[in-house]
Amino acid sequence: MVRRPLGNHHHGPDTLLVTSDTTQPGMRALRELVSRTQVVLWDFDGPICRLFAGHSAQRVAHGLLDWLGQQGLHGLLSDEDREPLDPHALLRAVDRRRPRSDLVTELEERLTQEELKAAVTAMPTPYADPLIRTWTAVGARPAVTSNNSPVVVRAYLQGRGLLPCFQPHLYGRTGELRHLKPDPHCLHRALSAMGAAPSTALMIGDTPTDLEAARRAGVHFLGYARNEHKARLLEEAGARTVVRTLSDLLAAVRPA
């Protein structure tokens, strides 16, 4: 099924939501996207794996908040900063209040350690591994552009045997937390290192912040939504093409 989104969304008339019941117009849109893509910029947590599948992101966020409380900094964040309970949102909020401080450095390191624990039980996104291998084999050049630590990305990809596909192009969180997406910094780093024009690149992401980073970097965007809620968020943010399963994209990538 290709569903035309409901009215009052911020995107063009040719917006498609491609679902697992693949149609000719949907596959045609995907094949056109694939045909003009030379560089694939992958978000990590979502399109490649569910990083916190066995190690809850909310529990990690609670742990970071508890640690701030132990430092006597419980009042540093507002109620708005604490909801939704998202580790990266917390990190950003602390950085806004104490930029480039030892506190931010320590908090970021604590998050990296939690992400490394999560990587052990991360759940591969269905069809991501064969898609990455197949797309690389037919000539695309992949990179990771993520808000997660590059140490964590490397550990996960190594464990799946996927690191050779990406090496050395892993662009994750740095000490400059103002550069987290939706800032396009990690996308710019990837494009620059790969000598790629934005028009030749496609970002695959699962959040509106990924979409915004792609827009600001001038690269094409493909949304991946594992459920209806994520699909709706991407739709409302203006994503032109969203897949509910990477098997559709794999079918579009495979040589006819």
Image (cartoon, rainbow, N blue to C red):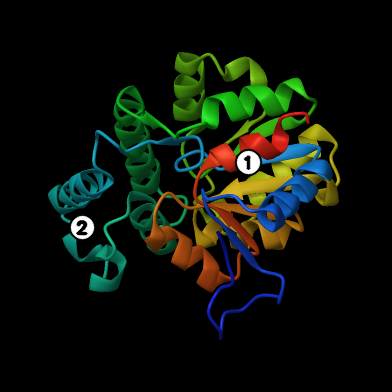
For the point 19% across and 50% down, the residue is 62
Left of 11 or right of it: where is 199? Answer: right
Of the numbered discs in the image, which one, if any, rests on residue 249?
Answer: 1
For the point 57% across and 80% down, the residue is 9
Seen in the picture, residue 21 relative to 109 is either above or below; the reply is below
- The span from disc 1 to disc 2 (Cα, nearest Å) is 46 Å
Question: Which of the 4 image quadrants contains residue 215?
Answer: bottom right
Q: Return the residue at label 2.
A: 73
SS for callout 2: loop
- The numbered mark, 1 or 2, whose residue comes first in the sequence reads 2
Q: Residues within 10 Å of mark 1 (few under 14, many from 20)?
A: many
Residue 172 appears anywhere in the view: no
Mark 2 belongs to which amino acid? Leu
Q: Where is residue 200 in the image (x, y as percent from the top left)?
A: 83, 45
Closest to the observer, 118 or 24: 24
SS for callout 1: helix
Closest to the observer, 141 or 213: 141
